[in-house]
């Protein structure tokens, strides 16, 4: 969709995080235009999830700033980010395995006391219909396939009606049949105007969804640009393969 790059919608500036002696993230900045969809890739352990955690307030950055649509969210707790329309999914789905698919959507929504159960149920029905999971609404979450669990994880984030959604490896471990469905859902959300950050190792899938990609290596952002330019960048090739040449599938 068309983006208005003149207005800074989401700006992360100079984010950093260390865990004891490990500098997991250092000096990472990311500007995202409204309605934009940006890939965030990098080798294992390069700091992508830690960055996502800071972008949604699950972790506070050691420094820097986070600005969303004019609001300064720096240092705020995750529920404050959520209230401002920032939602995320987890690399490993965090579902209530012994609750139904429907309850998995409703229970987190009800943690906001302003949300009434009937309204949450209506919204959950809409989310299930969008994700084509309505037929599974009464099934236990634990009975779902890996890909269906990823879909439900996405659904839980959608219950927040987010403006910005941070997706941490939505394609990992997903059967190819469902992979295409998840790709279509992400595209549809973006077409509705949702701003999206998409972390994954599946570069073919990333390439089919985003035009812009940022690359992390050893906690730093080493490239940010069009997918083709970035994957030709020698620093990116080196980060993924050491001395080997790129085959266009750096992270797969
Ligand atoms: N809670 C933590 N305590 C200590 N070290 C951590 C913690 N979380 C992450 N790390 C370390 O920070 C670095 C970055 O980890 P992170 O999970 O952000 O990488 P990632 O890019 O998401 O990797 P992957 O692609 O494997 O998911 C790694 O060295 C990791 O071991
Ligand atoms: Mg990760």
Image: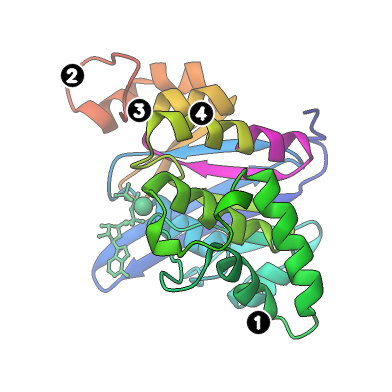
In the picture of the structure, the residue carrying the numbered disc 2 is 244
Please tell me whether mark 2 sits on a helix, a strand or a loop: loop
Q: Is residue 101 left or right of residue 177?
A: right
Q: How much space separates mark 2 and mark 3, taking CA atoms?
A: 11 Å
Query: SS for tag 3?
Result: helix
Mark 4 closeness class: few <14, some 14–19, many ≥20 residues within 10 Å: some
Q: Residue at x 75, y 39 (%)?
A: 35
Label 2 vs 3, first from the N-terminus? 3
For marks 4 and 2, the one nearer the N-term is: 4
Closer to the eye: label 3 or 4: 4
Disc 1 crowd, CA 10 A, few/some/many (<14, 14-19, 20+): few
- Measured along the vertical axis of the image, is residue 18 above or below residue 161? below
Q: Is residue 244 magenta?
A: no
Q: Quadrant of the C terminus?
A: top left
Separation of marks 4 and 1 at Cα, in angstroms: 32 Å
Which of the two discs, 4 and 2, sits closer to the camera? Answer: 4
| Residue furthest bottom as drawn | 113
Q: Which mark is residue 168?
A: none
Q: Which residues are magenta?
A: 186-202
- Give the Cα distance between marks 3 and 1: 42 Å
Left or right? Give the position of 211 relative to 98. right
In space, the residues marked 3 and 4 are separated at their CA atoms by: 26 Å
* Disc 2 versus disc 1: nearer the observer: 1
> What colour scheme does the image use?
rainbow
Residue located beneath label 1 in the image: 111
Question: Is the C-beta of the residue carrying label 1 under 8 Å from the nearest atom of ligand 1?
Answer: no
Residue 72 appears in which quarter of the rendering? bottom right
Residue 121 appearing in the image: yes
Name the residue beneath numbered marker 4: 180
Task: Give the residue pinned by disc 3.
Answer: 236
């Amino acid at each position: 969709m068309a983006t208005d790059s003149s207005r800074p919608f989401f700006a992360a500036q100079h984010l950093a995080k260390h865990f004891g002696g490990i500098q997991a993230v250092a000096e990472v900045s990311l500007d995202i235009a409204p309605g934009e969809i940006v890939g965030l890739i990098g080798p294992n352990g390069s700091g992508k999830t830690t960055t996502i955690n800071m972008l949604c307030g699950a972790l506070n950055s050691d420094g820097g700033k986070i600005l969303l649509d004019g609001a300064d969210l720096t240092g705020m707790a995750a529920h404050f980010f959520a209230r401002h329309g920032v939602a995320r999914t987890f690399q490993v789905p965090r579902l209530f395995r012994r609750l139904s698919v429907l309850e998995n959507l409703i229970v987190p929504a009800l943690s906001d006391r302003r949300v009434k159960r009937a309204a949450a149920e209506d919204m959950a029905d809409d989310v299930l219909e969008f994700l084509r999971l309505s037929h599974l609404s009464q099934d236990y979450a634990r009975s779902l396939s890996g890909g269906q669990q990823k879909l439900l994880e996405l659904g839980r984030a959608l219950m927040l009606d987010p403006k910005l959604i941070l997706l941490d490896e939505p394609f990992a471990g997903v059967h190819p049949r469902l992979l295409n469905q998840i790709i279509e859902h992400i595209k549809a959300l973006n077409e509705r105007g949702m701003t999206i950050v998409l972390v994954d190792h599946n570069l073919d899938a990333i390439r089919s969804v985003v035009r812009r990609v940022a690359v992390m290596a050893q906690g730093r952002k080493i490239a940010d640009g069009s997918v083709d330019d970035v994957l030709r960048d020698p620093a990116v090739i080196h980060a993924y393969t050491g001395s080997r040449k790129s085959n266009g599938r750096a992270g797969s």
